[in-house]
Image (cartoon, rainbow, N blue to C red):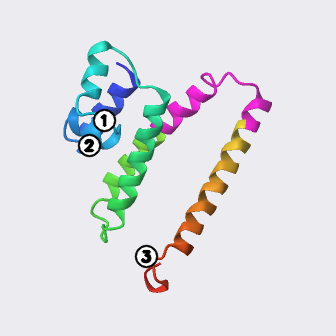
């Protein structure tokens, strides 16, 4: 079983996706039959597709969570986060050749990711501050 097949199976078992078409379009940002074609070829997802998956999962979960004012779905959100962590772990392993980079190179890689995170957070904050559609009341 490929990594992508295991993720799809877990998402479906946890009722986060309904079928392969939903998974392909909503989470992989591809055509409806992308996942089934990939599966029939026995190929796994590219790193770019995993990045799209990680982004879509976290974006959709965060959006849905903001409307959950109870703790009813707390276990569901945690399962969703656990699957996101598996995708992140796979991305990290791929980016580091399965963890075979030297410690110095790994630290440089970690520093680069932290720098990107800082820049990304600043950009989001700036967008929110200067968005004319947001008034101070609904910021």
Q: Which residue is mark 3?
A: 133
Estimate the spatial distance between the alpha carbons at disc 2 and disc 3, rounded to whole Å: 36 Å
Percent position of residue 71, x then y: 32, 66
Is residue 100 a member of the stretch shown in magenta? yes
- Residue 40 figure quarter: top left
Kindly identify which numbered label has been placed on residue 14: 2
- Work out which residue is located at the far front of the displayed protein and give it: 132
User: Which element type, helix, strand or loop, lies under badge 2?
Assistant: loop
In the picture, the quarter occupied by the N terminus is top left
- Residue 24 figure quarter: top left
Is residue 136 a member of the stretch shown in magenta? no
Up-down relation of residue 101 to residue 115 (above or below): above
Q: Is residue 114 left or right of residue 53?
A: right
- Of marks 2 and 3, which one's residue comes earlier in the chain? 2
- Work out which residue is located at the far top of the displayed protein and give it: 41
Q: Which residue is mark 1?
A: 10
Percent position of residue 11, x then y: 29, 39
Q: Is residue 120 left or right of residue 86?
A: right
Residue toward you, 80 or 44: 44
Q: Which residue is found at the position 76% from the left and 25% from the top?
A: 102
Up-down relation of residue 63 to residue 131 (above or below): above
Q: What span is in magenta?
A: 86-108
Q: Dot 2: within a 10 Å radius of its alpha carbon, few (fewer than 14), some, or many (20 or more) residues?
A: few
- Work out which residue is located at the far bottom of the displayed protein and give it: 137
Estimate the spatial distance between the alpha carbons at disc 3 and disc 1, rounded to whole Å: 38 Å
Estimate the spatial distance between the alpha carbons at disc 1 and disc 2, rounded to whole Å: 6 Å
Instruction: Assess whether mark 2 and mark 1 are in contact (beta carbons under 8 angstroms).
Output: yes
Percent position of residue 97, x then y: 62, 22
Magenta region, mostly helix, strand or loop? helix
User: Which element type, helix, strand or loop, lies under badge 3?
Assistant: loop
Query: How many labels, in total?
Result: 3
Up-down relation of residue 80 to residue 13 (above or below): below
């Amino acid at each position: 079983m490929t990594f992508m097949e295991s993720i799809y199976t877990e998402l479906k078992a946890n009722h986060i996706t309904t079928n392969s078409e939903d998974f392909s379009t909503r989470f992989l940002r591809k055509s409806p039959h992308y996942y089934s074609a990939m599966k029939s070829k026995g190929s796994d997802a590219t790193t770019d597709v995993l990045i799209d998956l990680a982004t879509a999962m976290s974006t959709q979960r965060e959006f849905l969570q903001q409307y959950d004012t109870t703790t009813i779905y707390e276990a569901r959100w945690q399962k969703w986060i656990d699957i996101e962590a598996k995708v992140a772990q796979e991305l990290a392993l791929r980016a580091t050749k399965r963890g075979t980079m030297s410690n110095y190179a790994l630290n440089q890689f970690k520093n680069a990711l932290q720098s990107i995170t800082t820049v990304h957070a600043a950009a989001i904050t700036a967008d929110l501050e200067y968005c004319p559609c947001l008034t101070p009341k609904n910021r």
